[in-house]
Image (cartoon, rainbow, N blue to C red):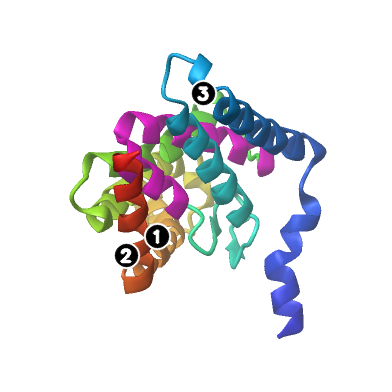
């Protein structure tokens, strides 16, 4: 049991100095935008919340229940802060934050075969999480739609670039659905299950109301 718990949190020891630098830059930028928000002509609140949500998602991504050799992990709801951010600030902000998070994922755990594969596995699928922002009246539906958007891009990558890993007799389509469906489906299910917790859901709604009133 202790060995399993150590393996779950073991990736924290592998955080690269470049990754730490990026996180520090995000935190510093968020702080600067907060303290100098009166001098800026754009919505600093959106940027500050974006930086915080990206940082939380990124830290959660280092807690891995399972890690696929070709990339992809099952984490304790690392996508959830990005879903919440898109829910609060809309699809444009959500897609932008998701793409930035995808770039951090590329730094954290790169698996590169081709430039198009990089796009399909990193910025585009995580940008798709921002689709949750289209569902202002249904947070949980936004989680499902944003999660499917991520699955779609990983599915394409699996068919095009990872079909050779399919067992004999299995088509690349079925292989990609099986692998990405099991990994991303589990990730989305965890996020959705957390959203069903009344205390968590109420906290999300209360914070949203306070943001709207601000």
Q: For mark 2, what is the residue?
A: 202
Q: For mark 3, what is the residue?
A: 37
Q: Alpha carbon of mark 1 to alpha carbon of mark 2: how far?
A: 34 Å
Q: Is residue 82 left or right of residue 71?
A: left
- Quarter that holds the N terminus: bottom right
Q: Alpha carbon of mark 3 to alpha carbon of mark 1: how far?
A: 47 Å
Residue lying furthest bottom: 1
Q: Nearer the viewer, residue 75 or 52?
A: 52
- Quarter that holds the C terminus: top left
| Part of the protein shown in magenta | 80-109
Determine contact: label 3, label 2, CB under 8 Å.
no
Q: Is residue 45 magenta?
A: no
Residue 108 is labelled as: none
Pick whichever of labels 1 and 2 is earlier in the sequence: 1
Under tag 1, what secondary structure? helix
Q: For mark 1, what is the residue?
A: 178
């Amino acid at each position: 049991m202790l060995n399993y718990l150590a393996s779950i949190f073991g990736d924290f020891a592998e955080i690269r100095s470049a990754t730490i630098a990026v996180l520090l830059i995000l935190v510093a930028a968020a702080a600067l935008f907060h303290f100098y928000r009166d001098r800026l002509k754009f919505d600093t609140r959106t940027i500050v919340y974006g930086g915080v949500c990206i940082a939380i998602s990124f830290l959660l991504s280092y807690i891995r229940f399972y890690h696929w050799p070709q990339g992809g992990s099952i984490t304790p709801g690392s996508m959830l802060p990005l879903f919440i951010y898109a829910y609060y600030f809309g699809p444009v902000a959500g897609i932008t934050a998701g793409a930035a998070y995808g770039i951090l994922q590329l730094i954290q755990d790169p698996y590169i075969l081709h430039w198009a594969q990089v796009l399909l596995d990193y910025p585009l699928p995580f940008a798709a999480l921002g689709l949750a922002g289209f569902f202002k009246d249904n947070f949980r539906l936004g989680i499902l739609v944003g999660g499917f958007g991520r699955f779609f891009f990983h599915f394409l990558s699996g068919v095009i670039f990872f079909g050779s890993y399919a067992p004999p007799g299995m088509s690349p389509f079925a292989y990609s659905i099986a692998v990405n469906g099991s990994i991303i489906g589990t990730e989305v299910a965890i996020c959705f299950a957390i959203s069903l917790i009344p205390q968590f859901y109420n906290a999300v709604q209360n914070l949203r109301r306070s943001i709207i009133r601000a």
